[in-house]
Amino acid sequence: MAELLVGTFTASLLLGGSVVLLHQSARVVDDLVSREESVETLRTTWTVLHEELGAGLRGRDWDREEGTDRALWLRAFRGIALPCEWEPGSREGRVTWRGHRAPDPDRDSVLVLEAEGGWRLAALEAVSSAGGACLAPLEGQVAQWRLSERVSGPILIRYFERGRYSLEDRAFRYRRGDEGRQPLTPERVGPASAFEASEGGGLDVILELQPGGEVRWKIPWSGPPGPPWDPSPFLPEVP
């Protein structure tokens, strides 16, 4: 009988110890997962913002959204095109394009750099396949594009979608056009996260990670270059 009692007592101790160890192990795993998700949130937010905002000019292509310090609107550039055949003053022509995704008339607009040196904004109305070779110095796919505006001597075309990045509802999120906000990170973004204007026209990003604390960094203002941009590399050689 005594041996039975001792055995039962020993088993209960071992069982209790196992429960404690399991509880501690689960807590350690939860902590590791939380920290890894915080690192992933920081990495994704930093990479996406620098890539997207670095492709445009503040005030023209992106800026803070009015009425909140937690959101940015932007022209999210998705690719470029060089004209192959385009009659001056026409809305339509052949181009070679390359980008992160295919151009889509349902969501994309374009910025067209004209021979005079200015940029013209237009909607991308239609895209269709086009055969034949293209002499433009760009490796890509040849297509027929139609725009909403007539353009004079197009040199370079950038196509983009209208988007919005935000630090809301505990995640770094993106909204394309009028669609719903989609989370790009785990829900580790704290309420103190914000976008603030910095000296020199740049942007300060304040990211509160939970866990992890507050991380700050600066995205410099992307201003136009000093000398005028030289379009000659994109022009055909004169024999």
Image (cartoon, rainbow, N blue to C red):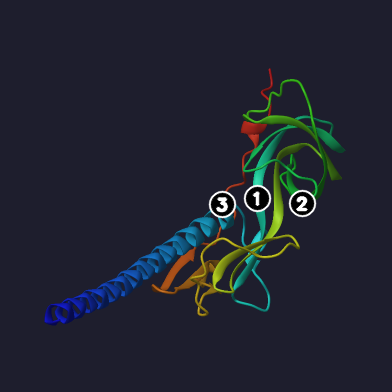
Q: Sort mark 2 into few (<14), some (14-19) or many (20+) by Cα contacts within 10 Å.
A: some
What residue would you read off at disc 3? Answer: 226
What amino acid is found at the position of numbered circle 3 in the picture?
Gly
* Percent position of residue 45, x then y: 51, 62
Image location of residue 153, percent across then percent down: 78, 36
Left or right: where 65 falls relative to 40: right
Asked whether 19 or 101 is in front, the reply is 19
Res 150 visible: no
Tag 2, which secondary structure? Answer: loop
Residue 49 quadrant: bottom right
Q: In the rendered image, which residue does mark 1 sit on?
A: 77
Label 2, label 3: how many angstroms apart (C-alpha)? 33 Å
Label 3 crowding class (10 Å Cα cut-off): few <14, some 14-19, many 20+?
few
- Looking at the image, is mark 1 or mark 2 nearer the viewer? 2
Front residue of 222 and 117? 222
What residue would you read off at disc 2?
107
Q: Against 138, is 57 above or below? A: below
Sequence-first disc among 1 and 2 = 1
Measured along the vertical axis of the image, is residue 98 above or below residue 43? above
Q: Earlier in the sequence, mark 2 or mark 3?
A: 2
Q: Are marks 2 and 3 in contact (CB under 8 Å)?
A: no
Q: CA distance from mark 1 to mark 3?
A: 23 Å
- What residue sits 48% from the left and 60% below the top? 46
Residue 209 left/right relative to 104? left
In 3D space, how far apart are the residues under numbered discs 1 and 2 (Cα atoms)?
A: 12 Å
